[in-house]
């Protein structure tokens, strides 16, 4: 899993921090989302998906790295 | 309807005219009344709309019409889509009352503005409500909760929970955060009530709004002379806003800070007392409190008449075309009962994973103060249940004065005994 955040979109509601505090934090000066771990371990995937689903500003997106690898392989073939 | 109201209705209907594909159901009048004996449930008409016609037409107080959006997914789509504007000055924006229109248009705050202006102003406050800072306030909120309960229970076994606990707790906290003297609480609570009452006239709202504005503007001037570490003082120190703008922002925070958590606390207590099985589960396992608060937010959804928006372009939603200039009301309470997302959603279940609720709204306008609300609610409910094991309602349930007449749902008073 690869996590992406868009700080421009973030409205600082903080729900991601509650769902997955190991992966998301907020910037001291303005409360905007900070990514702590862009490739979190499998045990956190569900929490990250939840954080992306409840993010009110759609500032979090999740990429499945396995699928990406496969797509890259197909491209190479 | 008077002539003036009729003219108003015509203006609000907008110049674009009605959509060609009006719903076959007769339009629902909103705010719709809840069913007798079911004060925790959304109005039957709204529930029916969600099941049968999830994007439907509704009629407002002045005879104008808007769209009513009732399903979880559709509500999230509207609130997350910048083609639906929160700018109350746009023609077609739906208002629930004349007072509501006065409140939203006379001195709009960022909740009634769109990006980029909304984001610019909101971001001046996001640091003040971030999760870490609110979590750090737990000891202070706990101390305030304990003090209030000490006072409430001293030599007595009955009290009004709203007046003595549910309202003073968030009031004290928001005053502390803003740097507003709590001694003036009767003044703001009175104005706050007027601003949120669906019965207030435009004139009453105008006066209450002006009173608060004057008070906060003077406070901002005082903070310039004598700064402290409250939010009002810090907004003054930034030097980007004038006193009137700071007063508008302060007014929004003060009202939101007072009324929302207060009503959630009292209504949550009542809902738990009415669901003794759930109450017992929570008492047996206090570690459920965080999830239980999310479930109470979902089940009770105190922003009960919905969030207003107006379309800026033609948008297709749930098979309907919403035309540019048409108003939309997103009913959060019906979205939070959507069976597709919350199976058995009409029941309170403190063990449910309710995190996808939209009780704080959705999209960029989602409640700024939610990390504070969560801390306050978790502490308020946990402390109350722990300290008062014999807590019970002190009047017949039928006599509880529910806030059907207010923009924020809840109870006007909650007589309890222990």
Image (cartoon, rainbow, N blue to C red):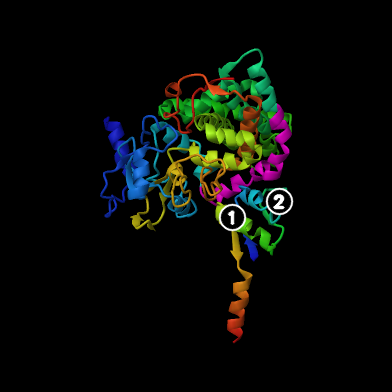
Snapshot quadrant of residue B371: top right
| Residue mark closest to the camera, 2 vs 1 | 1
Relative to residue B327, is residue A44 depicted above or below?
Answer: below
Q: Residue at x 65, y 41 (%)?
A: B129
Relative to residue B207, is residue B58 depicted above or below?
Answer: below
What residue span does the magenta drawing correspond to? Answer: B114-143
Q: Which mark is residue A27?
A: 2
Snapshot quadrant of residue B39: top left
Which secondary structure is most common in the magenta stretch? helix
Q: Considering only order in the chain, which callout, 1 or 2, is on the residue closer to the N terminus? A: 2
Check disc 1 and report the residue beneath it: A50
Q: Chain of mark 2?
A: A
Task: Give how far apart the Cα atoms at labels 2 and 1 are.
Answer: 21 Å
| Left or right side of B13 for B336 | right
Q: Residue at x 62, y 13 (%)?
A: B156
| Left or right side of B31 for A1 | right
| Left or right side of B92 for B408 | right
Residue B371 painted magenta: no
Residue B130 painted magenta: yes
């Amino acid at each position: 899993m690869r996590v992406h955040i868009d700080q421009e979109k973030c409205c600082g509601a903080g729900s991601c921090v509650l769902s997955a505090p190991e992966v998301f934090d907020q910037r001291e000066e303005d409360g905007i989302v900070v990514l702590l771990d862009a490739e979190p371990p499998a045990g956190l995937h569900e929490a990250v998906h939840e954080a992306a689903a409840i993010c009110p500003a759609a500032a979090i997106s999740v990429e499945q790295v396995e699928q990406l690898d496969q797509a890259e392989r197909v491209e190479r073939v | 309807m008077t002539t003036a109201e009729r003219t108003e209705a015509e203006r609000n209907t907008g110049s674009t005219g009605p959509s060609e594909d009006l719903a076959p159901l007769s339009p629902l009048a909103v705010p719709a009344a809840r069913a007798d004996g079911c004060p925790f449930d959304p109005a039957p008409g709204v529930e029916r709309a969600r099941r049968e016609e999830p994007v439907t037409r509704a009629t407002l107080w002045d005879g104008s019409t808007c769209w009513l959006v009732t399903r979880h997914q559709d509500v999230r789509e509207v609130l997350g889509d910048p083609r639906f504007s929160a700018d109350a000055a746009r023609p077609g924006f739906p208002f629930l009352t004349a007072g509501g229109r006065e409140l939203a248009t006379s001195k709009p705050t960022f909740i009634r503005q769109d990006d980029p202006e909304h984001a610019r102003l909101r971001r001046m406050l996001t640091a003040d409500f971030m999760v870490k800072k609110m979590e750090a306030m737990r000891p202070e909120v706990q101390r305030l909760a304990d003090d209030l309960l000490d006072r409430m229970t001293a030599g007595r076994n009955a009290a009004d929970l709203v007046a003595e606990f549910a309202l003073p707790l968030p009031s004290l906290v928001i005053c502390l955060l803003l740097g507003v003297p709590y001694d003036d609480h009767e003044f703001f609570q009175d104005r706050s009530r007027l601003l949120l009452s669906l019965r207030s006239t435009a004139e009453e709202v105008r006066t209450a709004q002006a009173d608060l504005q004057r008070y906060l503007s003077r406070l901002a001037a005082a903070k310039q002379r004598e700064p402290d570490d409250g939010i009002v003082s810090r907004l003054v120190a930034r030097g980007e806003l004038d006193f009137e703008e700071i007063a508008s922002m302060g007014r929004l925070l003060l009202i939101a800070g007072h009324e929302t958590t207060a009503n959630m606390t009292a209504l949550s207590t009542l809902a738990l007392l009415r669901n003794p099985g759930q109450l017992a589960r929570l008492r047996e396992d206090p570690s459920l409190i965080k999830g239980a608060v999310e479930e109470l937010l979902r089940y009770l959804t105190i922003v009960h008449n919905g969030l207003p928006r107006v379309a800026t372009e033609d948008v297709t939603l749930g098979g309907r075309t919403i035309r540019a200039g048409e108003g939309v009301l997103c009913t959060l309470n019906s979205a939070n009962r959507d069976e597709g997302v919350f199976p058995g959603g009409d029941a309170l279940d403190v063990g449910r994973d309710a995190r996808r609720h939209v009780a704080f709204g959705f999209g960029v306008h989602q409640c700024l103060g939610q990390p504070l609300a969560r801390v306050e609610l978790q502490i308020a409910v946990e402390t109350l249940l722990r300290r008062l094991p014999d807590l019970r309602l002190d009047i017949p349930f039928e006599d509880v004065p529910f806030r059907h007449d207010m923009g924020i749902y809840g109870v006007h008073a909650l007589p309890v005994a222990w």
